[in-house]
Every structure is written in C-alpha cells, then in structure tokens.
Image (cartoon, helix red, strand yellow):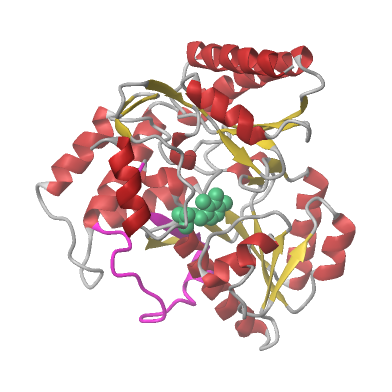
Amino acid sequence: MKLDDLKKLEKKYVVPTYSRIPVSFVKGNGVYLYDSKGNKYLDFFSGIAVNSLGYNNPFIQQALAKQSSKIWHTSNLYYIEPQILLAEKLSKLSNKGKVFFANSGAEANEAAIKLARLYGKTIDKKKTKILSLENSFHGRTLATITATGQKKYQKGFEPLPSGFQYVKINNVQDLKKKMSHETAAIFLEFLQGEGGINLLDTEFVNTIIDLAKKYKILIIADEVQSGLCRTGKWFAFKHFKIIPDIITSAKALGNGFPIGAMIAKKEISQLFSFGTHASTFGGNFLATAVANAVIDYMKTHKMDNYVATMGRYFIKKLNNLKKQFPNTILKVKGKGLMLGLQISPKIPVGKIIEKAREKGLLIGPAGNNVLRFLPPLIIEESHIDKAINLLSAILTENN
Ligand SMILES: *Cc1c(COP(=O)(O)O)cnc(C)c1O
C-alpha cells in the first residue's frame, strides 16, 4: 500500500497515541531497513533497543518457524518446555532467582511492584513505599507511570496509585532523606534510557546497597532497555558490585517477539504463591522459543564482549566528533552500544534526527536534547564509521 493511503487509514482507525514518522518499512536485513519507496536505511535505533540481533537473523527465524509448526500456546495450566528452559538460562545469567514471564517491560515491572508490596508486608504493614529515580522510565501502565519519575507521563491519569516517591539521580543526600523502614523497594535503571542515557555513579549505588541492607529494602533493576548485552555486559547492574533482588527484562529478549520477564531471588519469589499473579500469554511457546534462541545466539557469539569492544570504538569516534563540533556536542554519554550525545539546547535534536533519516540513518532522542544510539549489537566498525560520517556531514550543514 502507498504511504499516503496508509496515512489516511491510520488517521481514521488508529488511536492517535503516536506521532508517526512518515516512513513505512517493508523489510529488513542485518542492520539495514528498507522502506516502501525502496530507500535503504542504516538502523542505529533497533526498534527502541529491541532488534538487538538485527533483522532476519536466520537462527532466530528458524527457532520461530520450528516452534510455530509444532505448538503455539497451551496456557500456563500446563508445563511449557521452552519456558522452563528459558527460566533456567535467565536465572543463571542474572541473580540465580526464579522467573515470572509477561509480555512486555511494563508488565514485568508490574509484577516486580506487586511482589515488592507482598515482601514489605512480611516485615511491617507500613513497609509499602516504592522509590524510583527522577527521569526514570518504567512503562505505561498506571502503576508503572507512577514508578516513572517524570510528570509528563502521569499528567491527566490521576488519581495514581499511592506509595511512590522519587529520588534525585546520583544524589546521596536525597537518597538518605527518602530511604526508610517504610520503603519496600527501590527501582533502578543502572543506565537510564528514555531519561537521557544517564549512568548511576558508584558512590550512589554503594549508598543504596548499604541503606537497602540496613532497612531491608529490595533493589529492583529495570534492565528492560539496558539488559541482554546492550551495555557490554549481560546486564547493566554487572558494571557495579551488586546482585539485585529483582531484575526485569523485555525489549531485546524476543528480538521483536513480545516477551517480558521478572527474575526474583528465590526466597522473595516464593511470596507469589499459587494464584496470586498470572498472565494468559506470559511465557508461551512461541515467545520463549524465540527468547531461548536469542540468548543462545548471544552466548555463542559472546555478545557481551563484542558489544564492549564495539562500544569503545563507537565512543572513541563520538569523542572525535565532539572535538570537531565542540559548540554542538556537549557530552558523550553511556556504555557499550547504549550511547548518547548531549546536544546544545540551541540545536533541537529532532532536527538532527530528521536530517539523519533523510540521509539514510535512523537514530532517536532521549531525555533533555540527547541524541540516542541503540544500534543492533551485531554492527561492525564500518557501520559505525558510516554513521559518524553522516552525522559529521549533518552537523557541518548546521554549523
Ligand atoms: C521500554 C521500557 C519499559 C517499558 O517496556 P514496554 O515493553 O514498552 O512496556 C520499561 N522500562 C524501561 C527501562 C524501558 O526502557
């Protein structure tokens, strides 16, 4: 269908929650996407950190095809082999905990919030507060927009669930003020994505660890965007000396097939007893067959090390770009292949993103005027060079 016809139909029939970019992709291959007009794009956004293994990865395709010819869904009333095998893999890669499967990041975080409330009550009926960080992002359900420390996501949806409180990122004073015996859990993105590629600093994390121990507070790592090798380690928390009580995952886990997971340390996971939480689709055959293949592929190809190497190369190139355009680029941010450029407030990132797209490079925004890069983890140096050359040309035009 022609793009103009699609636009008209969309306007008539789809709820207008998205302001669409006027492009419709018809196929993908590796790190490239092709639109309905035959244009080719180098993808440095991966469907918002989802297509970590690129497009049409034959290993992942075969896993889905093979499973789809056998069985898709039975409900969680029965044993589901790929689900159980996936749980074992996720457990061993993260905190040795037990896994609850959902269909998205927000749902994985909902499960974590519910579990944290159950946990708090085992100690004191007043221990119900959930802390999160300013500028965080945890999803779009009612509870997860409340956990999200950004007003713009909450506006209009009040009354919000109660018992949430926000801490200034990397601010030890504020943390000490807000953590108490009434706190059940604290939500952390060790590297904030939507909020602007903001990394937690070691002193802040160490204080959280100390206070969490003192007040018996659960530490929840939201690894929905930063997990699964994105930052050069299997999970972003592995850059710190910590093993979170609960870890949530989604985005890259299905490489485009919807799936979410919450992994909770064994003793905490037991608080979800039979019937206390559920998901009809959560962990079904198709989703978990794909996710098993994603993890197997990442393990075989040592994606954590590969991303760390590629990330260092990309960061070096971004720093060179910063030297070339010191008035435009204020800071290079992030880790691995979850990177950002803080752009001067004089130049709206939206403009740069649009120009990049016109030249065949897909990138996105984050936080307060940050250009965000989330390329497929399989990119090579030549792709990075190409992206940097395009950006350099765009910023030259802008200067
Ligand atoms: C994307 C994201 C979510 C929400 O995931 P959905 O699958 O859109 O519900 C939650 N937390 C973080 C850190 C994210 O980046």
164 relative to 300, above or below = below
* Nearest to the observer: residue 253 or residue 345: 345
Does residue 230 belong to the magenta stretch? no
342 relative to 170, above or below = above
Q: Position of residue 199 (x, y in %)?
A: 71, 42
Q: Which of the 4 image quadrants contains residue 50?
A: top left
Q: Position of residue 263 (x, y in %)?
A: 48, 59
Task: Tell me which secondary structure the magenta stretch mostly adopts.
Answer: loop
The reply, left or right, for residue 180 in relation to residue 259 is right
Q: Which of the 4 image quadrants contains residue 138?
A: bottom right
Quadrant of the image for the C terminus?
top right
Quadrant of the image for the N terminus?
top left
* Magenta-tinted stretch: 256-284
Q: Which of the 4 image quadrants contains residue 314?
A: top right
Does residue 281 belong to the magenta stretch? yes
Q: At 78% across and 62% down in the image, what residue appears? A: 167
The reply, left or right, for residue 301 in relation to residue 110 is left
Q: Position of residue 300 (x, y in %)?
A: 37, 29
107 relative to 164, above or below = above
